[in-house]
Amino acid sequence: MKIRTLKLREAHKSINGINNSPSFCSILWDQQALHLVTASSSDPSISIHDPLLPSNPPKILRRHRDGVTGLALSPNSTCLASGSIDRSVKLYKFPSGEFETNVTRFTLPIRALAFNKSGSMLAAAGDDEGIKLINTIDGSIARVLKGHKGPVTGLAFDPINEYLASVDSIGTVLFWELQSGGILHTLKGVAPNAVSDTSVMNIVSWSPDGETLAVPGLRNDVVMYDRDTAEKLFTFRGDHVQPVCYLSWSPNGKYMATSGLDRQILIWDVDKRQDIDRQKFEYRICCMAWKPIGNALAVIDATGKYGLWESVVPSSLKSPTEDIPSLKNSNGLLLFDEEDPEPSTSGSLSDLGEDSLGESEPPSRKRLRKQSEFEDPDEDINDELSLLPKTEPRKKARCAGKENLGNEGLISVKSARLTMQEAFQPGATPPLPGKRRFLCYKMLGTITTVENDGYSHIEIDFHDTGRGPRVPSMTDHFGFTIASLNENGSVFANPCKGEKNMSTLMYRPFSSWANNSEWSMRFEGEEVKVVALGTSWVAAITSLNFLRIYTDGGLQRYILSLDGPVVTASGFKNQLAVVTHASDCLSSSDQMLEFRVFDISNGTQPLTGCLPLTPGSHLTWFGFSEEGQLSSYDSKGVLRVFTSQFGGSWLPIFSASKEKKSDESYWVVGLNASKLFCIVCKSSDMFPQVMPKPVLSLLNLSFPVASSDLGADALENEFILNSMHLSQIQRRMEEMAVAGLDTTALDDEAFNMEATQDRCILRLIASCCNGDKLVRATELVKLLSLEKSMKGAIKLVTALKLPNLAERFNSILEERLLNESKETHKTPVMNSNGSASLTADAAVSSTILTSTGKNETPEPSIAFSSPTLSAPLFIKKANKQEREKGDQNQTANAKTSMETSNAEKVKNAGNVKSVEGKMTSEVLKRCTYCGMDSTPQWRMGPLGPKTLCNACGVRYKTRRLFSEYQPAASPSFDEKRHSNFHKQIWKKRANLN
C-alpha cells in the first residue's frame, strides 16, 4: 500500500519554551465545514482556522490561563465549549468567538468535554471525581455522575440520547443511563492505561447510528461493544504496533480512522473490517476529525501542527458522507423541560433541547429541581426521578414528542436565557484571589485593594499628584468591593454580610478643618449596589431601588425611589447620572435601559430618556467627559455622548471595531473633547491588572461614517465632530447668558471653532470639485460662518476653473448679506442715550465722492444705510468691457469740463478726497457701537461686515445688544449707566420699571 506524506502547518506553540514537547491537541470541524478549531494542552489559546484560506492568520481566542485540554462544538455549530488545565469550562459564540460565560469550575484540570445531540447539555470531566452534566440553557448543573476511580479522559453521548459513555486513564469504561443517572455497565481494564502520560488520553466513540461503541483495546486494536448489552462484538486489528490513542467514525459510519502511538493513521472499512489506507507521520497524531462535507480528514499531532488529508477514502469506494443514517429518537433527556427532535442549523443555545415526552411529562419538574438546591442532592434526585415516567420505546417517544412539542416550551426556554444586566461600578474590576484589583479607576486617580487574612489593604493614588493630596493607605475590615473618588474625598461600600445581613457605606474626606470628619452608614437587609461622588454630595443606590443622597458631612439629604433596578451611576460636579432597567429584556436578549440626570444643588431632574445600546450588547462603562458631557460605552465597543441636538440625542463618536485588533479589547477610563482614554487589554482577561501598572492609551474620537464616494472619510468625520463641538459651545453660551454670566471667555472659543470648521468645509469643497460633486459643494458653502471663508471658497472654485459655480457662490454671499441687512432694519440697535447711536458714524462713513467729483452726505435723519457688499463680484468679460468703455467715456467728458474749471477747485477736490480717506480709514478701524479700536475679530454689524468689535458683534448676532451694554474696555463706558453683564442689565431695567 502506498505511503504518502502530508504537510502540516503549525497551529500552537508550547508556552514552556520546549519545542516539540508532546502535548494533547484537539481539532474539530463545524457543521458546514467552514471552520477548523484547534487547541493544545501547552497553549492557553484556541485557534479558529479558515480551511479554504489556510495561509490567512486564524482567529485567536484567549480566555484561559493555562493549556486547553478539551474542545466541543454544539451540533448546530453555534456554541463552542472549552476546558482547560486552569480548571474552568467556558462557552463562546461560534464562529464569532465572542466569549459568553464560564459555565463551571473544577478543582483539578479538565480532560474531556462533549455536547449531546441538541446542544442543550454539556458533559465535562477531568481529574476531579465525577462527571458534571451542565444545562447549557441556564448554566445549571443538572447532575454529577460519580463512579470512576481515575481521571476521566473520554466522554461520548450516544446519538439517541439515552446513554453516556465514559472512559478513564486506567482503562475503565462506564455506560451511564441519563434518565436515572445510574451505571448500566462497567467494563474494567478494557482500554490502555494512560496514567503516566497526560498527553495521551483514552477515548470512546459511538457509531453514527448509535448501535456500537468503539474503544481502543489492549492489543493495539479497536474493540466494538453493543449499546444495550455492552457485549464485545468484533475488533479491528491491523498494522498498529503500539496502542491506539485516538479514533474517529466517518459521518456515515462506513469507515473509521485510528491513530496510534506508532505515529501512523489507519483507515478502516467497517463492514469488511480491514484497513484500506494508511499514512505515517513524524509525530504522534493525537486527534482527528472527518470533514462533514466531502472526503477529507483533519489531523493534528502532539506538537500542535495540523493538516488536511484529502481523498482519504479511495474514489472506487462509497463516499464517507453518503447514506448518513437517520437516527431514531427516544424519549430524550428527562432532565430538561424542552427538547428538540432534530438539531437546528440556525439555532443557538436558547433553542429547544431534546424530544419532549408530551403529556406524560410532569409539569412541576423544574420547580422540583430548584428546590433540590437547598436540600440533600441525592435524596432529591431520587425523589424527583421517581416521579418521571419510565423509558418508553424510542419510536413511540419520538412520535409523542412531535405531537406535543408546543410554543409554551419554546417561550420558557428562551426566557430562561434572558437575564438583565447586573449592577456594576464604573472603573471597578472583579475580584481575583490573592491579587490586587481596582475598586475605582478614573481620570483623576485609582483606588486599589488586596485581600489579606481577614482584612484588605486599600491604597489611593492620583495620576497627577498636583491635583490631589497624598492620601495614606487604609486597612479595610469591612471588605469593600466598590468605591469612587474626586478631589475632595472617597466613598466605599460593601455587599451584605454578617448575621444581620448588613451593607456599609463609608465616606472618607481627604482634608477637613474638623477632626473625625469620616462617617459611615449601615443598611440592614439592603445592599449598596453603586456609589457616586459630586460637589459636596455622596450618592448610593441600593438593592431596594432607593437613591440615597448625603452631604459630604454625612447629612441624609434625599431618599428617592427609582423606577427599576440600578445598573450603574456616575457623578460630575452638581450632576448625578443614574442608569436603571426600564423593563425586562427583549426576546432578542437586548437590554432595556433608561438614564436620569439629577441636579443635586437645585433638586431638579433636567434629563431623562432611554439609553441606546448596540444590539446584543450590554453596558460596560458610563460617566461624564472632562467637559461634563454624559457618555456611555457598550460591550460591542461603541462610545456614545449625549448632546442637545435634535431635542437631546446620543451620538456614536467611537467604534472599537474600526480600531482594535482581533486579540484586543478596550477598557474605558474616560474621555475629553477629542480623545478616548482607555487601557488596551491583550490578554484573555477583559480587565486590566493592577501590577504592572497599566498604561493609558489615547484614541482619536471618530464617527462611524460610511465610505464616501469622495474618499474623504477623514474630512467628513472632522466636519461632524466640529459641528458637534460648535453646538456644545453655543449651548453653553446660551445657558450662561440666561444665567446672567459673562460669555466673553466663550466668544473666542466659538470664533476659533467657527474658523476651524470653515477650513474643514473649504477642504471638503475642494474634494467635491475634484470629484465633480458640485451640488454637494454648493450645500457646503452655505454652511460657512465667516465672510472671509466665503470669499476664499469663491477664489478656490475660480482657481479650479469653475466659473458657473463661482457665480453661484457669489449669489449665495450676496443673498446672505442682503438678508442680514434686512434684519438690521427690523432690529435697530440703541446706544446709551436711547437714540440711534450709529447715525453720526454712518453719516461720516457714508460720505463719498461721486463719479462727478461732488461731495454728498446723506441726511442725518436716516439712522442706517444699506451696507455695501464687500465680496468680490464675478462679472462676465463682456459686461466688464462695456463698463470699462463707459468709464473711458466719462473720463473724456470729465477732462473736457475740467479744462474750463479753476485750478483751485481741483485742489480743493483733492483735499476733500484726502480728508475723506483719512476719516473712512479711522471709522473702519473703530467699533461703530462702543468705539473700541482693538479686537480679536471684527464682526458683522448693522452697517455691514467688520463694523462691530468681537464682543458687540456676538451680542448683535444673538439680539442681546441693548442700549445699557458697553464693554468694560470701551472709552464710553460709564459705570452708572452701563454694564457688561447681561444679568445686571435686566436688574437695572427691572428697577426702572
Image (cartoon, helix red, strand yellow):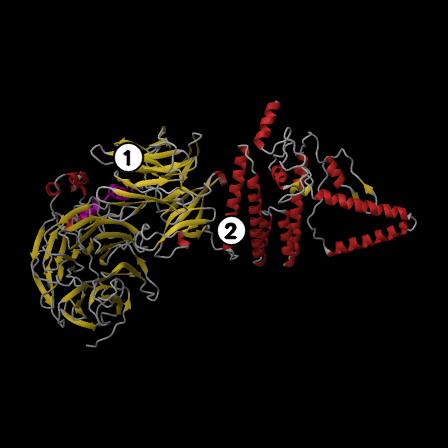
Up-down: is 628 above or below 52?
Answer: above
Q: Which residue, given by chain and number where applicable, does mark 2 sit on?
A: 718
Read off the residue under disc 1: 504
Q: Residue furthest bottom?
A: 2
Tell me where residue 798 appears, x and y as whole percent.
65, 56
Q: Is residue 16 left or right of residue 552?
A: left
Left or right of 662 in this view: 902: right
Of 245 and 515, nearer the camera is 515
- Answer yes or no: do the residues labelled 1 and 2 have beta carbons within 8 Å? no
- Quarter of the image holding residue 472? top left
Q: Residues within 10 Å of mark 1 (few under 14, many from 20)?
A: many
- Prevailing secondary structure class for the magenta stretch in the rendered image: helix
The image position of residue 11, as x and y in percent, is 28, 64
Measured from the top left, where is residue 448 in percent x and y?
A: 32, 45
How far across and down, in percent of the image, does residue 339 sit?
A: 21, 47
Towards the viewer: 816 or 841: 841
Could you tell me which quadrant the N terminus lies in?
A: bottom left
Residue 75 visible somewhere in the drawing: yes
Question: In the rendered structure, does residue 415 fall within the stretch colored magenta?
Answer: yes
Asked which quadrant contains residue 61, the reply is bottom left
Q: Which residues are magenta?
A: 399-420
Foreground residue among 717 and 990: 990
Disc 2 residue type (three-letter): Glu
| Residue 852 visible in the current orientation | no
Q: Residues within 10 Å of mark 2 (few under 14, many from 20)?
A: some
